[in-house]
Image: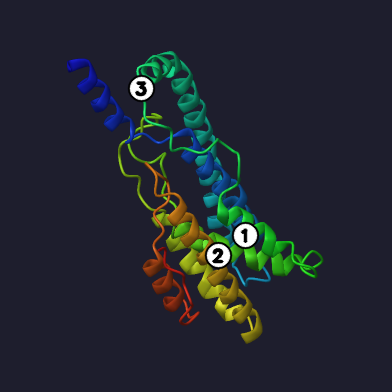
Amino acid sequence: MTSTLSVRASRRGTRKFLEPSAIAEAIAIEQHIVLRGYQALTHYSSTFGLTEHLVREIDDATRRHQAIVAQLQRMHADALAAETISSAHQEALAALGLLEPSQGEAVGATPPRPVQVCHIIQSYPGRQGDPESRAIVSLAFLLVAVHALTDPTNCGTASPALNLVPPPLHRDRALLDKVLKHVVAAFDASSISELTGFIAEASGSFAGWSTETQRGLSVLRYNPHALRTACRSVGLGEIDVRIAV
């Protein structure tokens, strides 16, 4: 009886840990949406009406997220190593019928939905030869990402056994607020309409991903209300921001 209770307690504790699949998702979003979004802002700073000071802030944010990716990659390696170490114990539990089926997906098997949707939109016919339009797509997905992701490296532990709630990307939200005010001033009505349409599509992909990731601990805390407020405050008006169901 004591042994069985210990196993159950152990399983309850394990659910608090950030699984390798969740860390891999965070890495994918950081690399393919956050970093590429900031790179697009830097490369097309004149298109977006950005000042040199803002570009320097964007460069700082890029370096910060490169460091986050490096830390996440170390956490991912540690988490995989921890799974390998415990595999013999898991096999013993499985033989006794005491191991619950894994709810995690294979690491890296499929990119997170926002990455897939962003790639599809940027690959539309006619957009391949329009890098500025692709940059607007990148900005839209970056904006939604900073209202959906948390920073699991900024919670007082670098352990794969993450059991603290990581904070939202407040610094990035503040930076994007300044960026978008310049963008709204620089864009004409057609470009603003294009941007808001992409924001709506990006929000739909993150809302869908939020529904998919209701399993264990995740880096995702999609906040459509904060996103809607941010869009309104910078002059983008009311956007059809999707809410996770």
The residue at 56%/78% (across/down) is 184
Q: CA distance from mark 3 to mark 1?
A: 40 Å
Q: Please indicate, yes or no, whether residue 196 appears anywhere in the rendered image.
A: yes
Q: From the viewer's side, name the closer residue of 35 and 107.
A: 107
Mark 3 in CB contact with mark 1 (< 8 angstroms): no
- The residue lying furthest to the left in this view is 2
191 to the left or right of 15: right
Residue 226 image point, x, y percent: 38, 67
Q: Which residue corresponds to the image point at 20% horizontal and 22% vertical from the top-left? A: 5
Q: Do labels 1 and 2 touch, CB within 8 Å?
A: yes
The crowd level at tag 1 (other Cα within 10 Å; few <14, some 14-19, many 20+) is some
- What's the CA distance linking mark 1 and mark 2? 8 Å
Horizontal placement of 138 versus 171: left or right?
A: right
Q: Secondary structure at mark 3?
A: loop
| Residue ID for mark 3 | 97
- Measured as percent of width and height from the top left, residue 63 is found at 55, 45
